[in-house]
Amino acid sequence: MTTEYEKMLAGELYDPFDGVLVAARHRARDLCQDLNATRESDAELRRRILRELFSKGGDSAMIHPPFFCDYGSNIHLGERVFFNFNCVVLDVCRVQIGDFCLFGPHVQIYTAMHPFDARLRREREFARPVEIGTDVWVGGGAIICPGVTIGSGAVIGAGSVVTRDIPPG
């Protein structure tokens, strides 16, 4: 039988109130709170928290707190990824970020989506993955919507709402 977690990652309708998913979100939010409470001078503690939070890539990432995510385990970071203050990654589905990507303050990356049917929306949601190539710069306040691919070398201007794929820049 397919688990709610497997449905979630596959982009199928799933139950976000499933106990396993709720526990995984609590774990990630606890780790985000730990990260957000660190001092600027405590780089090693930040690295340890990021290694535990992310599926891949926490070792060379630089993230200025506060930072928020849903699961962390669905975020796959390349080398030397930088997130400025107040970034949010709703990683219900896979978020793949290539090497040397830069994210300005208040950038939001969403994979979560909700059905248009109100009755279905009460109990189910679904997601679409986001893929960001290498050497991408996302300006402050940009929003990257579910299902988007941003090609390597692209520049996303501050305040942009990215609703469709962006070719390599």
Image (tube, rainbow, N blue to C red):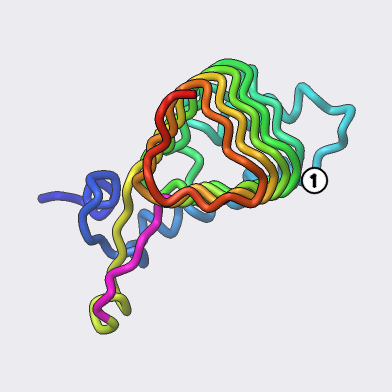
Residue at 72% over, 44% down: 105
Residue at 38% over, 36% down: 149
Label 1 residue SS: loop
Considering only vertical position in the picture, is 18 above or below 98? below
Q: Callout 1: few (<14), some (14-19), or many (20+) C-alpha neighbours within 10 Å?
A: few
Considering only vertical position in the picture, is 57 above or below 113? above
Q: Is residue 39 shown left or right of residue 102?
A: right
Q: Quadrant of residue 35?
A: top right
* Residue 114 at x, y percent in the picture: 34, 67
Of helix, strand and loop, which mostly describes the magenta segment?
Answer: loop
Question: How many numbered badges does the structure rendering display?
Answer: 1
In the rendered image, residue 139 lying in the magenta stretch gets the answer no
Q: In the image shown, does 138 or 95 lie closer to the viewer?
A: 138
Considering only vertical position in the picture, is 66 above or below 17? above
Q: In the image shown, does 42 or 159 lie closer to the viewer?
A: 159
Q: Is residue 104 shown left or right of residue 42?
A: left
Residue at 63% over, 44% down: 31
Point out the residue furthest to the bottom here.
119
Q: Is residue 166 shown left or right of residue 84?
A: left
Residue indicated by mark 1: 37
Q: In the image shown, does 153 or 106 lie closer to the viewer?
A: 153
Q: Quadrant of residue 83?
A: top right
Considering only vertical position in the picture, is 91 above or below 61? below
Residue type (three-letter) at the residue carrying disc 1: Ala
Residue at 10% over, 50% down: 1
* Residue 153 at x, y percent in the picture: 52, 21
Stretch in magenta: 111-117
Q: Is residue 97 shown left or right of residue 149?
A: right
